Amino acid sequence: MATAGYDENIWVMSMENQKKRKLQIGIAIAVLSAVALLLLVLVVVLMKGNAAGDRTVTEIAVDQTGEDEFDVTDNEDEEAGRFDVTGGGDEETDDQNGKSRSGAAGGGDEEADDQTGDGEDEWSVDRLKAGFETAIQYDKQYKAYISSREEAERKIREYGEQQRELYSNPEVTEIEKQMEQDYGLFAVNLGEMDVETARDIERAFAYMYREYPMLQGTLTNVSLGNLNGFTNGKIAITQVNEFIINEEFGVCPHVVKHEIILAASSFLNRDNFLKNCEQMAESGHWPEHTDISSVVVHELGHQLLNAYAMQQFGLQDPYYITEENEDAYSAYLTDSLSSYQEIPKQVLNEAYERWESEHPGEDYTTFCKEISEYAVGVQTDGGISYPETFAEAIADVYLHGEDAADASRKIDEVIRE
């Protein structure tokens, strides 16, 4: 019995052990199955995540290495990255030396239609003009080391050529290239504007560069632009724009664009622009018979004054700033940015003295108003804006010649001496 009992106990224990093992095996299988299922879910999630990541990387790669890429240094700059005119990381310029003409031309606040088009809606000049905006990006800045004046000029030209790829306007492009050749401009981008308007602009340049040779070599760019960041009503600005920065602002050498930017909201809306010119002239705010060409002459008047100031400060090669011309450039820029510029003030005071000798007792405000109401150019602090008075006088002489206001002819006389 003992043996039998012993054997029975062994069998009972064996059965219990088998049950325990089966239970353990079942639990293990269940755990392994759960783990396997979890791993499968994780694999699927990771695969989906990788697919999404690849798409994002591809989109970024297209932005950074697409046809619109502009690499000033011909290699990747560690701090600034690759230069991409379509990217969002580049800094936008402020109006660093902005002299501008304001008016009531409409369209500035309207939003453009889709500029590139999707599907069957293909890009076209007329489609972009519908919103009175341009594809041109005039205000990009880059970081790079530019080793020579020739390289600086080449980079400005390359950027202009790249902007030209953003629009297709063959007749206007021919005018652009001719202007570059005739007036020593590095880049002209008139964009989507009408041929008639482009010819008006060229007519203004032909007059100014013929009558005032000192303009030659002082202006690098003329471009259509969206002046949305400026006060409503801006028609054009004449400015100095830091284009290629070496490490940080002010470090030599660096590249500067001296440019006139024409507001797309006006220059793409020709009929409204002409109507605006007529109304402003009739009101006396602008000189009589003001037209698109004379508006551009006004802006070139600002640049003429800049050219005169460059001469006074001894500034040469004004677009490539090095240790050799840094002091002259700083003096020129400081005077241009001050509220009461010394160089314009000297020109206007000399002209006023000559005018006052023929109009004894008449004050300076009367001298300015003889040109136009806008020539008074009152600043926010109540002072006279000498550059606006000067530019209006140049436009008046362009429009009326010997029949221009006496004040205008005196100013013109001083600047020609």
Image: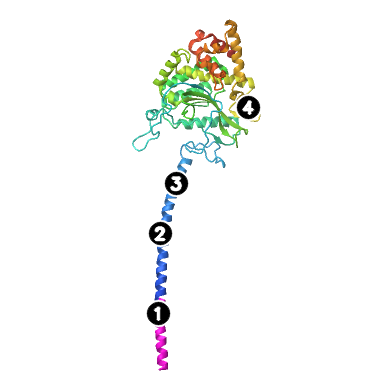
Please state, as top left, top right, bottom left or bottom right, where the N terminus lies in the image: bottom left
Region in magenta: 1-21
Mark 2 or mark 1, earlier in chain: 1
Mark toward the start of the polypeptide (1 vs 3):
1
Residue corresponding to mark 1: 18
Q: Is residue 304 visible?
A: no
Is 4 contained in the magenta span?
Answer: yes
Count neighbours of disc 2 (C-alpha within 10 A) and say few if under 14, some if 14 to 19, many if 20 or more: few
Residue type at tag 1: Gln
The answer to whether residue 192 is left or right of residue 406 is: left
**Disc 1 packing (10 Å; few <14; some 14–19; many ≥20):** few
Numbered-mark total: 4
- How crowded pointer 3 is (Cα within 10 Å; few <14, some 14-19, many 20+) is rated as few
- Of the numbered discs 1 and 4, the one sitting upstream in the chain is 1
Residue 79's place in the image compared with 181, above or below, is below
Q: Earlier in the sequence, mark 4 or mark 2?
A: 2
| Separation of residues labelled 1 and 4 (CA atoms) | 95 Å
Which residue is the site of mark 2?
41
Q: Secondary structure at mark 1?
A: helix
* Label 2 SS: helix
**Which label's residue is closer to the chain start, 4 or 3?**
3
Outermost residue to the front: 382
Residue under pointer 3: 56
| Rendered image quadrant of residue 170 | top left
**x then y, percent, for residue 17:** 42, 80
The mark nearer the N terminus, 3 or 2, is 2
Residue receiving disc 4 = 330
Q: Are marks 4 and 3 in contact (CB under 8 Å)?
A: no
Give the distance between the C-alpha atoms of the residues marked 4 and 2, in whole angstroms: 65 Å
Q: Position of residue 122 (x, y in %)?
A: 36, 34
Residue at disc 3, secondary structure: helix
